[in-house]
Image: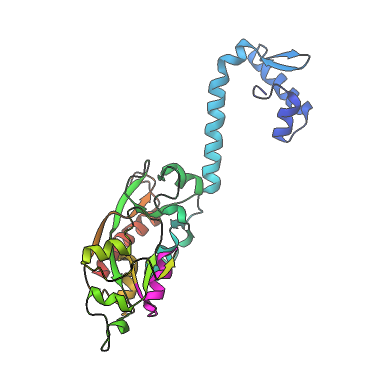
Amino acid sequence: MARHGSIRKAADELHVTPAAVSQQIKVLEDQLGQPLFHRLANGLAVTRSGQAGLRLVREGLATLENAAQLMAARRSADTLSVWTAPSFAAKWLMPRLHRFVDQRPGVDIRLSASTLLIEGERASGVIGGDDLRRHGVDVAIRFGQGRYPGCRVDKLLPGAVVPLCSPKLMRGAKGLREPADLRNYTLLHDDTAYEGRPDWATWLQLAGVTAVDASHGLRFNQCALALDAAAEGQGVALSLLPLAATDLAGGRLVVPFAPRIELDAAYYLISLPTEEETEAPEIVAFRDWMLAEPQRDQ
């Protein structure tokens, strides 16, 4: 009412009749013993008494709306909402997730993959606690600098970039032996827009190789695609080592030679800051399991 200055507009917003709004105003004024609105020819104006409490009323309604959104978005009991980037979901999380399911068979997982989890895709480059609340997310896995306001942050995996290829490319008389041999193979470019991403030109310079044209090859907008192409023997990828862990362990990929580029960015596990004794047990269990998983790769 105070915002619209009109009973009809307020009624339309509330999806009730104007008569119902008028009745509620009259009931409230009778309870308070003083008018809250001046009835004008072209609408309503808030009285001085009404203005006195308007700010606190608005704050109270906003709090109620936020609480309703949280309750509506909040997972049901024993349901875990996990938010992560597509390539991390495909190459790291999915091959391992069955182990958590085996440990906690009663927990239902809702997994959402979004490129918003990659640093730099938002104008601000920052995702925080408000984003988790708005999307109803319990746990997010994010690649970036580890600065996520309003969140609990646990470092999961360090960021490192290495060349990766199928082991069959290293066999035979013309197999990969040293970085200069890359001139005989297709370069696979991981063009995922993560912060600090090095390219083949940077890597070749570090390796002291000058006879390889870093501008040619196949380009992919997701790390998972570049790694799959490398595993199929289509060329040599330069990509994130943590995402190749499953393929390395299974022998589908190898690191043919150095150097290895260490990044400032890393993978982080983020969740809302909650006192340990009041935090949902499935969130605690998932975090503990995630933080223990990298030890299996080592």
Quarter-of-image position of residue 128: top left
Which residue is more in the foreground, 288 or 39? 39
What percent of the width, then of the height, locates residue 278? 37, 46
- Magenta span includes 230: yes
- Magenta span includes 18: no
**80 in relation to 166, above or below:** above
**Which residues are the magenta region?**
221-236
Q: Quadrant of the N terminus?
A: top right
Residue 94 appears in the figure: no
Q: How is the image coloured?
A: rainbow
What percent of the width, then of the height, locates residue 179? 24, 73
Question: Can you name the residue that lies furthest to the front here?
Answer: 211
**216 in relation to 148, above or below:** below
Residue 209 appears in the figure: yes
Quarter-of-image position of residue 87: bottom left
**Residue displayed at 40% across by 61% down:** 191
What percent of the width, then of the height, locates residue 214? 33, 67
Q: Quadrant of the C terminus?
A: bottom left
Q: Is residue 245 left or right of residue 52?
A: left
Q: Is residue 155 left or right of residue 217?
A: left
What percent of the width, then of the height, locates residue 10? 71, 28
> How many numbered callouts?
0
**Residue displayed at 44% across by 57% down:** 82
Which residue is more in the foreground, 85 or 45? 85
